[in-house]
């Protein structure tokens, strides 16, 4: 059978996945479904790309990591832009079908939690949003126990002559990332002596800033849509989401700004 555009992309299956729950269908529910399905596709790509960056870091592949960080930075810009589209839906439009979401909640996005864990935002309490014993719960639990991207970054720093403190190497992988003054001293030296590495460090900072921008826009979108009400499915709302703001993935890259 000849390979066609539609067959290659499985368009018959893909375009059949947008099925509103409201009856008769509320106009904006299709927008809501499409945006969140597209988010999940971008999360899948980010997990794919950060898997490569982790391998690049551990292999000391500077230019491979630079190229891929440029890509994930652009993906984040797209994630932020999608919020602009979602905000064309008024609170009244959302309210018209919100009850049909029942217990479904964005807090149940297994891929986003996986991404957080991979980046070092380790929050074991997030496992509760997946049914115990389910494949999704098992996958998240596995990701929680794995080395984070920052741990692979330490591998990269070692290839550049940085002695990583033993305490960082022995750190429980379930714990979140923390700033370290020894790493900060090393980063400042790399900025001053290895300009090729400084390109990577700035791209990492760009990504971190972009992720915080997305979190902020997400919080404001939730506030704009439902105010301070609980989220769908009884999940925490905007007040809870605010707690994730301004918590960088790479805290050492931000700490050194006041020392330059």
Image (cartoon, rainbow, N blue to C red):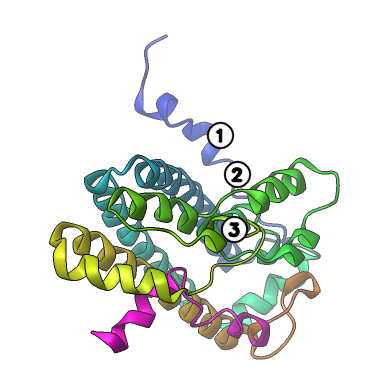
What residue does disc 2 label?
A: 17
**Residue 17 among those drawn in magenta:** no
- Contact (CB < 8 A) between labels 1 and 2? yes
**Residue 112 % position (x, y):** 58, 58
Residue ID at (31%, 68%): 186
Q: CA distance from mark 2 to mark 3?
A: 28 Å
Mark 2 or 3: in front is 3
Q: Earlier in the sequence, mark 2 or mark 3?
A: 2
Q: Quadrant location of residue 61? A: top left
Circle 3 Cα neighbour tier, 10 Å, few/some/many (<14 / 14–19 / ≥20): many
Q: Which mark is residue 117?
A: 3
- Give the residue displayed 62% in from the left and 80% down from the top: 241
Magenta segment:
239-260
Corner quadrant of residue 76: bottom left
SS for tag 3? helix
- For the question of whether residue 84 can be seen, the reply is no
Outermost residue on the right side: it is: 132
Q: Is residue 170 above or below residue 175?
A: above
For mark 2, does the 10 Å Cα neighbourhood hold few (<14), some (14 to 19), or many (20 or more) residues?
A: few
C-alpha span from label 1 to label 2: 7 Å
Q: Residue at x 72, y 50 (%)?
A: 141
Q: Nearer the viewer, residue 177 or 216?
A: 177
Q: Is residue 157 above or below residue 227?
A: above
Return the mark for residue 13: 1
Label 1 environment density (alpha carbons within 10 Å; few <14, some 14–19, many ≥20): few
Q: Position of residue 170 (x, y in %)?
A: 60, 56
């Amino acid at each position: 059978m000849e390979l066609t555009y539609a067959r290659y992309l499985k368009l018959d299956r893909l375009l059949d996945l947008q099925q509103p729950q409201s009856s008769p269908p509320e106009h904006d529910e299709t927008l809501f479904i499409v945006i969140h399905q597209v988010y999940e596709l971008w999360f899948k790509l980010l997990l794919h790309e950060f898997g490569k960056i982790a391998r690049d870091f551990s292999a000391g592949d500077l230019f491979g990591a630079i190229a891929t960080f440029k890509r994930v930075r652009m993906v984040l810009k797209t994630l932020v832009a999608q919020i602009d589209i979602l905000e064309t839906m008024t609170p009244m439009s959302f309210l018209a079908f919100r009850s049909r979401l029942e217990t479904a909640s964005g807090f149940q996005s297994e891929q986003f939690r996986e991404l957080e864990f991979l980046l070092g935002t380790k929050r074991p309490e997030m496992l509760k949003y997946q049914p115990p014993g389910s494949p999704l719960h098992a996958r998240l639990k596995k990701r929680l126990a794995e080395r984070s991207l920052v741990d692979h970054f330490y591998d990269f720093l070692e290839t550049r002559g940085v002695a990583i403190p033993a305490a960082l190497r022995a750190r429980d992988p379930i714990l979140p990332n923390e700033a370290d003054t020894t790493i900060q001293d090393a980063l400042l030296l790399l900025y001053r002596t290895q300009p090729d590495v400084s390109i990577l460090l700035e791209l990492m900072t760009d990504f971190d800033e972009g992720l915080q921008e997305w979190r902020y826009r997400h919080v404001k979108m939730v506030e704009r849509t439902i105010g301070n009400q609980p989220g769908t499915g009884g999940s925490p709302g905007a007040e809870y989401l605010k707690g994730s703001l301004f918590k960088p993935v790479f805290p050492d890259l931000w700490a050194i700004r006041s020392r330059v």
